[in-house]
């Protein structure tokens, strides 16, 4: 989420109009051909003349003090050109900055990329080597001698919160409690979010349900491992090519961590092989730059899958309690939540976002949320698509389901009765503007999926979601080229491949030209002013605000050229259907000028035409969704098969509908994986036991059914096309929808994720045992 | 420095020869020695399918084969799928059906799908899903991938 929206930000009002391009499906996506032919260039595909290969030595201990690191033997190995350790990086003070939806602290970032006093998790970097070949670099890592003082470790959030737990940071005093505690603890911060009076709320309730949930850490699971190449030069500009969701944010972090001027670093984002929030952070970049600086040659670093799992991502594992109350006529009156979130080895989970949105789908007057941000011996968590929200929804949406059942009200009807709408007070602060939550519930209710027959051991569940869209700094330039085509240089990394198409569609719509006359071209950090990263569903939502501004700016310039040529005033010229035209018959009889006509003569009438936007986008409309899921539970094995799945969501306006649906399918698939299979498993020594796709099993094609995606459009009033962020909401409901469907099929409620066969079987057998005992 | 071996092979119809270290995988050779970077590495343990290629007509994970094992082999990679400007029907259908987002899995999925359709040009949806179960995609949820393969099969059958 980063920072709060500024009062000086830019939002353009929604304009209802007939659209020619936006909302259709383009017949060509500029990134797609190169991706199907293998020509698209991802970070690991780039090679520079004279490059070295960099490799990282990582801790095998979950928690240990670093007594000494001896790199002398590695440095002597022929072919080794540079070695870096903590000695090569300046220490950093406490300094907070926004990095995607999570906040970072440079004191911790420098310790995360290269251990200083201690190693804090299995996989923590201790040293890095650059050599003339990968095999030499690997051999050199084996020659580095590290002396550790192994310390007791703690992996799970509840254990880490105990007063006698091993401490990761000996001086860490919990923030957010009054008076401040005198003893250090692993609880980095306590957060609260309140609305109304929780006790009064529960007094009004006829039904109160309180439940406890546990979820395991999961990984973003992008198929492209992190990769970076750096070329340090003293005189010019240090160039970095990297797989990132935000090249400008990377640039500022590299500059800060290495004490360089921002102007001396240029970052080029490569085609991105998936990120989902996991490529918001620096990992390899500063190491590659430092190695390149020492070796005086380019250095390429690519993570192995094992490194990706052990040392990047994941999301927080959690322990959650949800208590909700309703009156007997079905009105929710109180919601109380306790959220204990793993932050990984440094403070800063997604708790600040989650704590304030636990109940933001319901018109609920009395809310109390208490959250604990807890450090433990795992990699520092990274954002993962609506970070932390699926776990909260697992709790809230299954408790809501129980209350509805207890009151004998249909689960969708119950949600409709309590649905947030325009004017509903949120517990994160403002009242909601126009939103489409009710519309998604009604569309789900009317969906043919709801009528599909269910057989034995089959059940249906529904769950709903809310998530923010963020705005932030967004810059773009639209160049009107000399042949009348237009190039939009954009700065929000296209993390999905559809962003480029969406932005160029919007520019074509604005200019009134065919889509193929506009090309969206990715920027590097030297081609535009600062852009925040693609996070918080902002890629198209915020990027298009800048694109519209650029297009309108360019149109003003083109009108100016026409006015000069016709010797009339600019307000006597209008822009219509891709042409400058006289505003009325009285202006004169002038032949309309196309973009190409104007581009040809622009130099004479003042100079090249370009449109600019350097804005801080605000007014981003939040997104809501409702999912329906049918499962079949195998009573013999506990295996759960998803039979049917439907995603309904308010997109505000889907710029490129087929792509929006595709993104929703992918998010739901990730949510289904999270629900049924995916989890980080640590052994007694605190080592990750499943750092590969064989044992950390993400869904494959045969695990999933056909996914239906239905778009609802309730325009965001503060976007010229009504666009809302679409990418994150659909990962939120699946865990809850599946848990509700399992209950519907078996009568057993499961409150632990993942609902893998052993857990489900245990729960089923427990229920059988209970029935037998009764 | 490890001794290097001299290997000859035919890749996408061209005779090539290369030097490789004995532990280098065929995937590394394709990407690092021959600069055929269309074939991707997602795991190097045979679990993701991003490195799928054809070796002597057999679908393999190139990360599980050594470069030296390619001696005398006929190899096909994604770079050989299109003919000039003419995309392979699967490539066209993948684009039309939005069967790719980030695209990192796409070369592997295309190679595997082509192999499926060469064996069976009238697969059921379930057969497509089972055949592609070795190719991970984290972006699409496979929905549109399956649709694209079914549509390509239909076009190949001339139906
Ligand atoms: S890279 Fe070969 S299967 Fe993943
Ligand atoms: S399109 Fe991104 S992994 Fe398949």
Image (cartoon, rainbow, N blue to C red):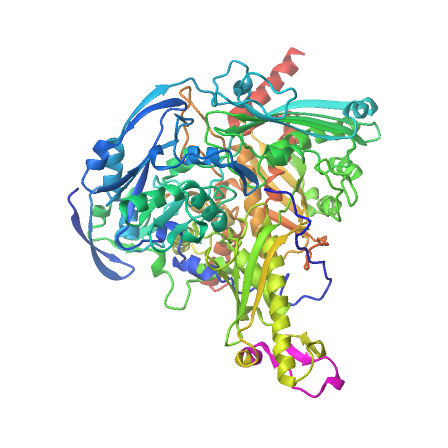
**How many tags in the picture?**
0
Q: In the figure, residue B84 lies in which quadrant?
A: bottom left
Q: Nearer the viewer, residue A328 or A762?
A: A328
Residue A508 on the magenta segment: no
Q: As drawn, is A259 to the left or to the right of B97?
A: left
- Please tell me whether residue A557 is drawn above or below residue B158 in the rendered image: below
- Residue found at the very far bottom of the displayed protein: A589
Residue A363 in the image: state x and y as whole percent: 77, 37
Question: Can residue A562 be seen here?
Answer: yes
Viewer-proximal residue among A272 and B93: A272
**Residue A465 drawn above or below residue B86:** above
Instruction: Using the image as rendered, state which of residue A446 and residue A56 is in the foreground.
Output: A56
Asked whether the viewer can see residue A266, the reply is no
Image quadrant in which the N terminus of chain A is located:
top right
Q: Considering the image in quadrants, where does the C terminus of chain A appear?
A: top right
> Above or below — where is A90 with respect to A589?
above
Give the extent of the magenta segment. A578-599
In the drawing, does residue A508 fall left or right of residue A288? right
Q: Give the side of residue B72 with respect to residue B141, left or right.
A: left
Residue A598 within the magenta-colored segment of the rendering: yes
Q: Could you say where residue A645 lies in the image, as x and y percent from the top left?
A: 61, 43
Q: Residue at x 52, y 20 (%)?
A: A160
Rendered residue at 68%/51% (across/down): A619
* Residue A321 drawn at (x, y percent): 65, 24
Q: In x, y percent, where is residue A270?
A: 43, 53
**To which quarter of the image does residue A55 belong?**
top left
Q: Relative to residue A10, is residue A130 drawn left or right? A: left
């Amino acid at each position: 989420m980063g920072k709060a929206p500024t009062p000086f930000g830019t939002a353009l009002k929604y304009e209802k109009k007939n659209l020619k391009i936006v909302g259709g499906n383009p017949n060509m996506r500029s990134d797609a051909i190169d991706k199907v032919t293998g020509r698209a260039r991802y970070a690991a595909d780039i090679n520079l003349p004279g490059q070295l290969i960099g490799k990282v030595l990582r801790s095998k201990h979950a928690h240990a003090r670093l007594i000494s690191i001896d790199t002398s033997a590695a440095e002597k190995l022929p072919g080794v050109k540079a070695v870096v350790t903590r000695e090569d990086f300046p220490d950093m003070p406490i300094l907070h900055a926004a990095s995607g939806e999570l906040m970072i602290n440079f004191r911790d970032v420098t310790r995360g990329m290269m251990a200083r006093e201690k190693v804090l998790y299995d996989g923590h970097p201790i040293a890095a080597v650059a050599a003339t070949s990968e095999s030499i670099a690997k051999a050199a890592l084996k020659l580095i001698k590290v002396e550790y003082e192994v310390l007791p470790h703690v992996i799970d959030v509840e254990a880490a919160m105990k007063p006698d737990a091993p401490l990761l940071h000996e001086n860490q005093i919990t923030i957010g409690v009054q008076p401040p505690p005198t003893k250090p603890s692993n609880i980095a911060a306590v957060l609260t979010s309140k609305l109304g009076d929780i006790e009064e709320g529960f007094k009004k309730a006829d039904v109160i349900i309180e439940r406890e949930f546990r979820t395991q850490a999961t990984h973003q699971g992008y198929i492209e491992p992190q990769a970076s190449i750096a070329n340090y030069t003293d005189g010019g500009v240090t160039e970095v090519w990297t797989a990132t969701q935000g090249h400008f944010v990377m640039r500022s972090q590299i500059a800060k961590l290495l004490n360089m001027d921002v102007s001396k670093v240029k970052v080029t984002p490569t085609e991105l092989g998936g990120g989902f929030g996991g490529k918001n952070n620096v990992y390899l970049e500063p190491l590659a730059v430092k190695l390149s600086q020492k070796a005086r040659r380019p250095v390429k670093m690519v993570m192995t899958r094992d490194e990706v799992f052990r040392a990047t991502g994941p999301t927080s594992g959690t322990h959650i309690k949800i208590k909700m109350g309703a009156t007997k006529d079905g009105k929710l009156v109180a919601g109380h939540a306790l959220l204990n979130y793993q932050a990984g080895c440094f403070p800063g989970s997604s708790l600040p976002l989650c704590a304030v949105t636990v109940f933001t789908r319901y018109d609920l007057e009395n809310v109390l949320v208490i959250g604990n941000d807890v450090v433990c011996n795992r990699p520092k968590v990274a954002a993962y698509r609506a970070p932390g929200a699926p776990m909260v929804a697992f709790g809230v949406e299954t408790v809501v389901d129980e209350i509805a059942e207890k009151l004998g009200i249909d689960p969708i009807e119950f949600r409709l009765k309590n649905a947030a709408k325009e004017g509903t007070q949120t517990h994160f602060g403002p009242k909601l503007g126009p939103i489409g939550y009710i519309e998604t519930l009604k569309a789900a209710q009317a969906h043919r999926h709801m009528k599909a027959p269910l057989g034995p051991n089959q059940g249906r569940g529904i769950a709903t979601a809310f998530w923010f869209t963020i705005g932030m700094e967004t810059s773009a330039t639209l160049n009107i080229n000399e042949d009348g085509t237009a190039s939009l240089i954009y700065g929000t990394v296209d993390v999905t491949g559809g962003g480029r198409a969406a932005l160029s569609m919007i520019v074509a719509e604005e200019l009134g030209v065919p889509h193929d006359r506009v090309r969206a071209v990715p920027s590097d950090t030297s081609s535009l002013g600062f852009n925040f990263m693609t996070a918080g569903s902002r890629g198209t939502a915020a990027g298009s605000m800048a694109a519209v501004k650029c297009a309108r700016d360019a149109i003003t310039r083109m009108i100016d050229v026409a006015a000069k040529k016709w010797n009339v005033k600019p307000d006597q010229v209008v822009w219509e259907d891709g042409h400058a035209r006289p505003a009325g018959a009285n202006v004169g009889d002038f032949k309309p000028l196309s973009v190409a006509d104007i581009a040809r003569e622009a130099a004479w009438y003042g100079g090249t035409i370009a449109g600019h936007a350097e804005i801080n986008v605000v007014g981003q409309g939040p997104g809501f969704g409702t999912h329906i899921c049918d499962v079949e539970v195998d009573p013999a094995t506990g295996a759960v098969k998803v039979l049917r799945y439907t995603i309904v969501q308010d997109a505000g306006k889907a710029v490129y509908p087929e792509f929006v649906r595709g993104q929703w399918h992918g998010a739901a698939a990730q949510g289904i994986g999270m629900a049924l299979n995916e989890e980080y498993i640590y052994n007694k020594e605190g080592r990750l036991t499943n750092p590969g796709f064989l044992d950390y099993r993400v869904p494959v094609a045969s695990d999933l059914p056909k996914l239906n995606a239905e778009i609802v459009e309730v325009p965001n009033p503060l976007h010229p096309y009504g666009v809302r962020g679409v990418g994150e909401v659909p990962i939120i409901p699946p865990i809850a929808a599946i848990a509700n469907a399992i209950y519907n099929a078996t009568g057993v409620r499961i409150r632990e994720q993942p609902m893998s066969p052993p857990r489900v079987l245990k729960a089923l057998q427990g229920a059988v045992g209970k029935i037998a005992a009764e | 420095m490890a001794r290097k071996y001299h290997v000859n092979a035919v890749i996408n119809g061209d005779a090539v020869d290369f030097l490789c270290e004995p532990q280098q995988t065929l995937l590394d050779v394709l990407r690092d020695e021959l600069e055929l970077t269309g074939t991707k590495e997602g795991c190097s343990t045979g679990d993701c399918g991003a490195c799928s290629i054809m070796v002597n007509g057999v679908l393999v994970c190139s990360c599980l084969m050594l470069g030296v094992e390619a001696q005398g082999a006929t190899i096909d990679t994604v770079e050989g799928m299109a003919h000039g400007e003419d995309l392979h029907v699967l490539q066209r259908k993948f684009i039309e059906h939005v069967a790719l987002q980030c695209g990192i899995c796409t070369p592997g999925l295309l190679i595997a799908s082509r192999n499926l359709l060469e064996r069976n040009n009238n697969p059921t949806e379930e057969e497509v899903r089972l055949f592609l179960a070795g190719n991970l995609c984290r972006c699409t949820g496979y929905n549109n991938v399956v649709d694209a393969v079914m549509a390509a099969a239909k076009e190949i059958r001339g139906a």
